[in-house]
Image (cartoon, rainbow, N blue to C red):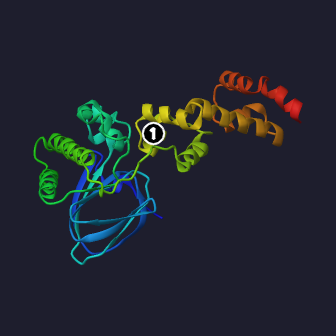
Amino acid sequence: MQKFNLCEYVNSQENISLIHMYHDRNCDTHIHEFVELIFIVEGACEHWVDGEKYAAEKGDLIFVNYGQTHAFHALTKEYQYYNLLYVPQFFSDELINSENIYDIFEIPFFREFDNLPTSSAQLVRFRETEYVEIKKIIEDMEREFSEKKIGYRSILNGYSRILFSKILRKIKNSDSDMELQTYINRITSECLDYINEKCFGKITLQEIAEHTFYNPAYFSRIFKEQVGVSLTDYIKKKRMSEAARLLCDSDLNIEEIMHRVGYTDKNHFYKNFKEIYDMTPASYRKKNS
């Protein structure tokens, strides 16, 4: 599966990209390292997000979050859309701490929407005057992004707040035929695989959070809620489990094992091992040899 890397599509000095696309081609299943908002300005298409199909046409805005699978197929020859690509660093500190792009709607700036359901829209429909209004906002954003005049990033930040507020208003006042899909934050198997792969070397919360596109504090909280232990305890148990296996199944000395499972401090290693197994590594090896 193709992966669209962040560095290839978004300038790290801007943390936003906005492109007006004209084409009738299809795009095979892929994932990307940024959040994508797709606003259809002409034609019709089918989008697949995490395997779910969405029939989209002029005025529809589609969310694709970091790490979700995405593909689309144009249904009309004349197919136009805007691509808005975001990474959290684009926003102010308040918005960076909104944890995940969908949780942006929980920050104090949007408190007037407190009664909004917790689900988030995967597809939002704007018609008639609403379509004209949203299109004008995005066109103004595209012009600012292209011209890059003094203050353009602050202006793009402001337009983004307006755009998200309009989306929220639409969701809150949506008709029954509006297509909504619940978005639930999850520690995915891919994320756990990444942690399991990296946990025997140097690994930081910041690195994991960046890989999963979450704010670090928020990632720690939902990790504990869903896995049942803190990230620190999870990594410690993984390391100690591997150390115990190596003590039984290899001839490596204890210092070599300590380094294999990611420790450089002997006292720290012994303390954590005894905390898990209630004995020293040497006693564990002797008991289980």
Secondary structure category for the residue under label 1: helix
Residue 250 or residue 97, whichever sits in front: 97
Residue located 53% across and 34% down the image: 225
Q: Residue 28: where, in percent of width, then height?
A: 41, 69
Picture mark count: 1
Q: Residue furthest bottom?
A: 77
Kindly tell me whether residue 177 is visible in this rendering. yes
Q: Residue 284: where, in percent of width, then height?
A: 83, 29
Kindly tell me whether residue 203 is visible in this rendering. no
Q: Is residue 5 left or right of residue 135?
A: right
Q: Residue 162: where, in percent of width, then height?
A: 18, 43
Residue located 49% across and 40% down the image: 208
Residue located 30% across and 75% down the image: 75
Q: Residue 278: where, in percent of width, then height?
A: 77, 23
Q: Amino acid at mark 1?
A: Ala
Q: Is residue 201 left or right of residue 155?
A: right
Residue 137 or residue 155, whichever sits in front: 137
- Rendering quarter of residue 146: bottom left
Residue located 21% across and 42% down the image: 165
Compared with residue 59, is residue 256 higher up or lower down, i.e. above or below?
above
Compared with residue 183, is residue 225 higher up or lower down, i.e. above or below?
above
Residue 185 or residue 89, whichever sits in front: 185
Q: Quadrant of the C terminus?
A: top right
Compared with residue 49, is residue 218 higher up or lower down, i.e. above or below?
above
Label 1 Cα neighbours within 10 Å, binned few <14 / some 14-19 / many ≥20: some
- Rendering quarter of residue 98: top left
Question: Which residue lies under the disc numbered 1?
Answer: 209
